Amino acid sequence: MSKKQAPVTPEQVFEEYRRGVTYKQTLGKHGLVEQNRINERFYSGDQWYGVNCGDNRPLVRHNVIKRIGEFKMAIVASSPMAVQFSAEGVPNTLELRGRVEAIRQQMQAGAVDTAAITAEEEAQVVAGALTDYFATTSRRLGLDTLARQALRNAYIGGTGVLYTYWDDRVRTGLYADMSRTKPICGDIACEVLDIEHVYVGDPLIEELQQQPYILIAQRKPAAQLQRLAKRCGSGDWRSIRPDEGGEDMNAHATLLTRFWKEWNEDGTACTVKAMQVCRGAVVREPWDMGVRLYPLSAFKWEEKRCRAYGESEIPHLIPNQIAINRTVSAGVWAVMMMGMPIMLVNGDVVQQPITNDPGQVIPVYGSAEEVQNAVRYVDPPAFSAQLDANVQSLITDTMTQAGVNMTLLGDVKPTNTSAILAVREASLMPLQMVRNRYFRFLEETARIWCEFWLAMYGNRALKLQQADGVWYMPFNAEKYRDMLLSVTVDVGNGSQYSEDRSVETLDNLYKNGVITAKQYLSRLPQGYVPKLDALLQELK
């Protein structure tokens, strides 16, 4: 018997939303939302925003923030990764893996005796199928692009959020009957959310899955929200109006989506519920999502104790960036003043317009003293020869303190690959903590996807893509609903040096006769040999 909670009203949801907005305004010197706007401007290069310097002086930008950020994000997301599902409580011996592979081949051929399959074999077959299906779903949704977008949001705003939801309009190409008259529609979809639009129930809890509730704020046209409310069967759709009031239904209104977990009486199981509201109106009544995890996965660039939101490193780089820009601009202005100093003209003697163009002839009438004093240049102040050195030192120190040096950026001659690789790997060690958080973010995403597969798929086939082609495996989600699955992310080497070293090792193994040509080709990094699958087929 489930533990029922009191009904939540739109007024309560908006009060929770206001509390979340107020808390974000207390974070940092400018508040989370305004600070993220500042971070975005500095990262994109709009670093003189709001500084009234006029149009006469050159406003130089040497964007070290973007170079640091792009390098770190490239390192974090450069390594190839693969998600592996495994069934807990089931052995995974070499002998069992051989039997499972044979069963998969029989299922692919359509000749499987289900009565001869043991429970252990079935569990491993399902885990292996979900592993392959994760790769299929990743390609369909463009997970690489979504993850990199969340990574960029995390670097600029401190936290990147990926929202997974069920879209019943997705066409799968599958049918529920043999005559192909009942199409199966509906599948998961993903969207990257800005942390400014995500609000947690308790900002002192670090883990997202332990939150009492989570809110997502969106701005949509009032007419679109009315259509959504009618589609969901809400009787309040006529009450939906723009936030600013009026009758212009193209104006925007705030839509709040609230998620919370509803537990049973003994607190051993839960289900995630959701509802959508506008001001004074329910867009969609509370519904059971069927999953046991919040459908949001978050990646924090820097973690802070007792805080649900992450922190970006950009605010700590901004003072150095301002100093670099001001120093470089001062140096450029000083050089310009030395080459084109300010001209003083006696207006009583010189009557014609002065353009200061090189070679301009200025007629002056009068005595020699009047001619000498008619036009003269203002000597600029002495220019320090150490200015350039100080600028370079400031840039180098800023990048070094941020964990970026010339070796990491590749500004070295690759004369000794092993030595460069050793120095590079040692320099990347401080960034390993960020990478670990990124891989944990991908693991959490995989768990959420698996929850949707087991809760929403019902009886449908899984599209599996392998080296020998694409096939569809029968899958009954309800049967495996309570299966305990663990998720791990296998990470490979992503640098060019590591790939070259791997190929060099394979070359030596092949030359010494340790491996065959097929084993050699199948282990080459992706992209080294065109049409590798066809070549491996020819070697069979």
Image (cartoon, rainbow, N blue to C red):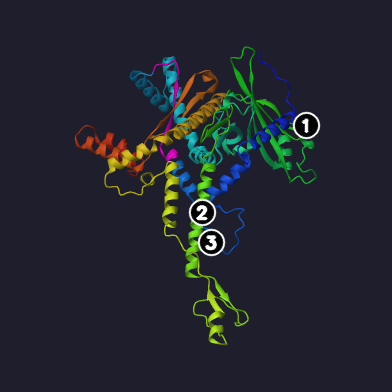
Name the residue: 36% across, 21% down. 97
Q: Relative to 526, does residue 101 appear above or below in the rendering?
A: above
Magenta highlight range: 75-91
Q: Which of marks 3 and 1 is nearer the N terminus?
A: 3
* Secondary element at tag 2: helix
* Residue displayed at 46% across by 48% down: 67
* Above or below, 434 relative to 65: above
Name the amino acid, label 1: Gly
Residue type of the residue flagged with mark 3: Pro
Out of 457 and 374, give the one closest to the viewer: 374
The secondary structure type at the circle numbered 3 is loop
Residue 113 seen in the figure: no
Q: Residues within 10 Å of mark 1 (few under 14, many from 20)?
A: some
Question: Disc 2 to disc 3, how far (Cα)?
Answer: 10 Å
Q: In which quarter of the image is residue 385?
A: bottom left
Alpha-carbon neighbours of circle 3 within 10 Å: few (<14), some, or many (≥20)? some
Q: Earlier in the sequence, mark 2 or mark 3?
A: 3
In three-dimensional space, the C-alpha distance between marks 2 and 1, rounded to whole angstroms, equals 58 Å
The mark lying in front, picked from 2 and 1, is 2
The crowding category of the residue bearing disc 2, from other C-alpha atoms within 10 Å (few below 14, some 14 to 19, many at least 20), is many
Number of the label disc, if any, that sits on residue 58: 3
Q: Mark 1 points at which residue?
A: 235
75 and 227: which one is in front? 75
Q: What residue is at 55 percent from the left and 52 percent from the top?
A: 47
Q: Where is residue 211 in the image (x, y as percent from the top left)?
A: 61, 25
Label whose residue precedes the other's in the sequence (2 or 1): 1
Decide if residue 84 is on the left or right side of residue 56. Answer: left
In the drawing, what numbered circle is on residue 325?
2
Rendering coords of residue 214 (x, y %): 63, 29
Q: Which of marks 3 and 1 is in front?
A: 3
Magenta stretch holds residue 389: no
